[in-house]
Amino acid sequence: MSQTLLKVSGLKVAYGGIQAVKGVDFEVHEGELVTLIGSNGAGKTTTMKAITGLLALNAGDIQYLGRSIRGRGPWDLVKEGLAMVPEGRGVFTRMTITENLQMGAHIRSGDKAGVAQDMERVFATFPRLKERRDQLAGTMSGGEQQMLAMGRALMSRPKVLLMDEPSMGLSPIMVDKIFEVVREVHDQGVTVLLVEQNASRALEIADRGYVMESGVISMSGEARDMLTDPKVRAAYLGE
Ligand code: ATP
């Protein structure tokens, strides 16, 4: 089996006295596209934030490349290849598209040629960003900002890309485009952990899936099996 890149074990995270994540275990192997699905408030975003060092753990451990990353900060983890596209995108609205992409590569300031090459690759994946390279990010549509957030994360040359609800709030055409691009990025060799409320679309492109419910993992399996599982279909695919 391929290498385990990310291993979450016994993860618990609380906000004050409220336990949002109550003991979660899952793994992501090299080259996989894994999705974490589940309804509103299930604890998916909290789990992602704990992995990327934005929230402290109450219990459990997170291993990346075989070593614990508990207590390490987001910048430090990006340098090691763990990049996140946050919920709500978080682009720098008063900077241009090109400047946003350059910010994504800030950890690689010594590698000008490589950065320029990656910028061209991002522009090839997202022609819309190329057309608007000098436009301020804040003046772009939600879908365009989502593409920019993904492009910016790719500029750090991640091994693992964590994405939190990339399809949220987008028009159906944009949702199609975003899922297509997630698949494309994965096909280029990036391991992906995708949090989505759009369970059927996420399972269609994923290798494996985990369902999160009230702070715990309630189901897991091969994505294609989950898509046809009557329990998953009834609870999460609107049937
Ligand atoms: P969504 O799809 O709505 O983002 P989610 O599965 O990502 O849902 P979380 O955002 O992780 O869920 O929330 C898990 C629980 O933690 C919820 O009950 C939520 O109200 C609570 N929670 C999230 N953020 C905070 C916070 N900053 N302070 C207090 N409670 C919070």
Image (cartoon, rainbow, N blue to C red):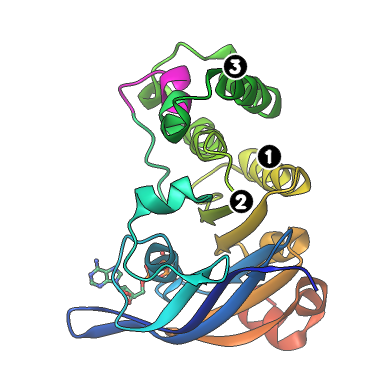
Question: Which disc number belongs to residue 177?
Answer: 1
Mark 1, other Cα within 10 Å: few <14 / some 14–19 / many ≥20:
some
Residue 89 horizontal/vertical position (percent): 42, 43
Residue at which label 2 appears: 159
Q: Residue at (80%, 74%) from the top-left corner?
A: 1
Alpha-carbon span between mark 1 and mark 2:
22 Å
**Quick check: 127 above or below 33?**
above
Q: Any magenta on residue 122?
A: no
Tell which circle, 3 or 1, labels the residue nearer the N-terminal end. Answer: 3
Q: Amino acid at mark 3?
A: Lys
Q: Is residue 3 above or below residue 76?
A: below
* Quadrant in the picture for residue 96: top left
Badge 3 is on which residue? 130
Q: Earlier in the sequence, mark 2 or mark 3?
A: 3
Range of residues picked out in magenta: 93-101
Instruction: Say which residue appears at 58% left-offset and 41% top-offset.
Output: 171
Q: Is residue 23 above or below residue 108?
A: below
What amino acid is labelled 1 in the image?
Lys
